[in-house]
Image (cartoon, grey):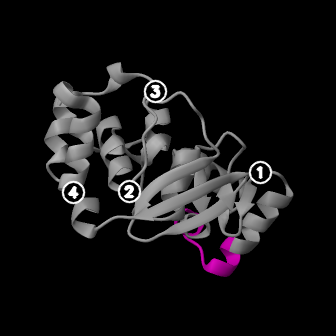
Amino acid sequence: MDISQRLKLLNNSQKTVFKLKDLQDLWSDNVLNTKMSAKRMVGKKLLLKLAKNYYCLNKEYNIYELANLIISPSYVSFNSALFFKGVCFQAQNTISSVALFNYEKKIDNKIYKYFTMKKELFFNLEGIIVQNNISFACPERAILDSFYFGFLPNVDNEEKINFTFLKKISQFYPNSVKNKIKKIYGSKV
């Protein structure tokens, strides 16, 4: 397979970021050949290397997709998800996600940070949206996750919050989270 065929497979994949394993699977090649092909493509500026074993087609890659790629399974949450959905207006240099273990990695001047959640709550998919290669918390779940971890969510646009849904999915969270919701949002929930 030549470089143009490899590049075409990457473009057709609908992804913006790739692990070395993704390249190997897409190209149906062994690890050594995949590494050599990736290195050649980086040298010709057809592929960009973000970090060891992480690549993108260009600088316009999706940071949220990368967040899901670094740790899988995971989903983008907290203020990162609120910003993504237009509830919070403050952009941050840290992309925060929920996963099954704590982890932090810096790539391309952004920090990707992961927080551990109990398995039964993590695998409850209520309020998790999967769209365009990205898993993220809906605004209501991001708010609940924030309270669960002791963070105060940045809510600049309350109109984008479905308080009925917030109350519904809060039943899966501990009482401490439910109490914070009632204290902050009162009669809305």
Instruction: Say which mark, if any, is on residue 124.
Output: 4
Q: Are marks 3 and 2 in contact (CB under 8 Å)?
A: no
Which residue position holds label 1? 46
Q: Which residues are magenta?
A: 23-34
Instruction: Name the residue nearer the viewer: 177 or 117.
Output: 177
Q: Is residue 130 left or right of residue 182?
A: right
With 169 as the anchor, is 42 left or right in this view? right
Question: Main structural element of the magenta stretch: helix, strand or loop?
Answer: helix
Q: CA distance from mark 3 to mark 1?
A: 33 Å
Task: Inspect the magenta stretch and tell me whether residue 50 lies in it.
Answer: no
Q: Name the residue type under label 1.
A: Leu
Q: Quadrant of the C terminus?
A: top left
Residue depth check, mark 3 versus mark 1: number of the one nearer the observer: 3
Q: Identify the image quadrant of the N terminus.
A: bottom right
Q: Given this view, does label 2 or label 1 mark the residue nearer the observer?
A: 2
Does 27 appear in magenta? Answer: yes
Residue found at x 34% / y 41%: 143
